[in-house]
Amino acid sequence: MTNMKRIYYLQRIILSVLLLLPLSGCFDSDINRKMYEADDSEMQRENHIVGATLRVMQGLVSPTHEHLYQFMDAMVGGAYGGYMEGIVDTWVMKFSTFNPEQGWLKSPFADPITDLYPQYLKMLSVTDDPVALALGKILRVCVMHRVTDIYGPIPYSQMLSNDNLGENLSVPYDSQEQVYTQMLKELEEADKVLEENKDLSSEAFRKLEDLYYGNISKWRKFLHSMQLRIAMRMSYVNPTEAQRIAENAVAAGVIEANEDNAMLHVAENRSELLFNNWSDYRISADMVSVMKGYEDPRLDVMFVKGINTVEVGGEKQEVNDFYGVRIGIFTEKKDDMINLYSKQIISSTDPYLWMNAAEVTFLRAEGALHGWNMGGEPQALYEKAIALSFDERGAKGADKYVKDAEKKPVKYVDPMGAYSADAVSEITIAWEQGSGKEIFERNLERIITQKWIAIFPLGLEAWAEHRRTGYPRLLPAVENKDPNNSVDVTIGPRRLPYPADEYNSNGANIAKAVQMLGGADAAGTPLWWDAKDHSVENN
């Protein structure tokens, strides 16, 4: 049965390749032949397939398909990361109120998996070029890291088994700890290959991928930065291993300059449709409370001011300012909100952000705060990260900003008058000198709050860090419609429940996955790495 499946799968690959070739082309059945043994036409064919598969996989890290981006990065990451809220007045069941439709739960789980693995397997079948396979391995980790951090246990190690071939999800799950262990192992393997090929000319892959255009040195910095990101996620559940991985990653070389930022370049950034053409999302009250309180110069280069009509002295006047939407509300009339509330500045020519130097430097600052060797002191790294963010955004005044020990987040005033709320944090910007648990925690809040600003709009990453550390402090959702009554709005949701389709088609394996989860399949159940005592920051 397994052999029949493999033959069937290879027949599908052959057919797809033939459809991609010109009519005069030919096909050699020995698809695993070494690149240096191939003639020119075969190399062109192989490069075409490798490039096509790499680009599809790259398009799943931060989804370039607008609908998957909407489900994962706007609906889930945007709301739970404290960045944005949907203002569509027909959405009565949604993530931000913890009662999404079942169809909405399926997409963030099934789509990345079923879209990724056929491409990955295709590449494994048509090439044994070590660099191509290393890049594919890195991309698999990047995509699946997001999925496991949304749900917890996921199908991972057996997705490439002979019994599956990536064609369906009906395979056993790995615990999240097992997934992390395997991801880190694969990154180490990929790094070894890239190190062995560090002198490879960028021309080899320049036309095959759109992140670093074949620059192996930059790919390695990104890989090490991913190791650092994953290591920090483990800091409360396995601090010893987290420190080891983080220190090795920094020593090997991480992203330190904006010129090395991981930005996927595309012909058309279709995520902008969500904010411009569709006008479905506006920025959060949290973002406005924090950045207006800090009088943050980045506001003007990140967001568009809203227009509020007010009455002054018996006359109506338009007031242009930054206005945010409370997350977890039900919209009464979308048309009343489109021009009133602020939106992010984005165009169809913008690249997709995966990771920037500011995030990596904030990660190093946090590691240094823990006493790890991060190549610098925590305060210096913290201030450098803020400066990197200002430079990336084209904002001025970072030197003055980092020294401000007075400004704090301000009360949120809803321009529609319904959902105003006091600020939930009093954290200032300037680094606090001294030692002890309280000062440590306040400096940690500074690091995470500033990182939250700097990595916008990476909502899924912001949500993961909020769950891990409790920061930034976010306003509680207005409406809690969680059908399982599992979400504590003071700390927010901890994961997404598995889609109903998994129970229908993969019942035995999903039952074991829930056992691995260690709690109910509900939004309030914490993930493996979500191990901090959150009473620390909530006091």
Image: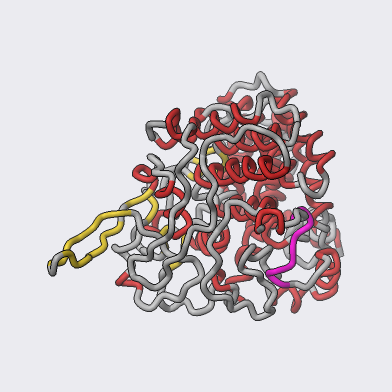
Please name the predominant secondary structure of the magenta segment in the image: loop
Question: Which residue is outermost to the top?
Answer: 199
Magenta stretch in the rendered image: 522-530
Residue toward you, 101 or 370: 370
Q: Residue at x 66, y 41 (%)?
A: 439
Residue toward you, 246 or 265: 246
* Side of 426 relative to 57 (left or right): left
On the question of residue 118 being in view, the answer is no
Q: Residue at x 82, y 56 (%)?
A: 158
Residue 107 percent coordinates (x, y)? 60, 66
| Quadrant (top left/top right/bottom left/bottom right) for the N terminus | bottom right
Q: Residue at x 70, y 28 (%)?
A: 374
- Give the total of numbered labels: 0
Q: Is residue 168 within the magenta segment? A: no
Residue toward you, 220 or 26: 220
Residue 41 percent coordinates (x, y)? 59, 34
Residue toward you, 302 or 402: 402
* Side of 232 relative to 471 (left or right): right
Residue 458 percent coordinates (x, y)? 54, 50
Residue 216 percent coordinates (x, y)? 63, 27
Up/down of 89 relative to 251, above or below: below
Up/down of 59 relative to 485, above or below: above
Q: Residue at x 61, y 51 (%)?
A: 471
Q: How is the image coloured?
A: secondary structure
| Quadrant (top left/top right/bottom left/bottom right) for the C terminus | bottom right
* Side of 224 relative to 387 (left or right): right
On the question of residue 168 being in view, the answer is yes
Up/down of 74 relative to 523, above or below: above
Q: Is residue 528 within the magenta segment? A: yes
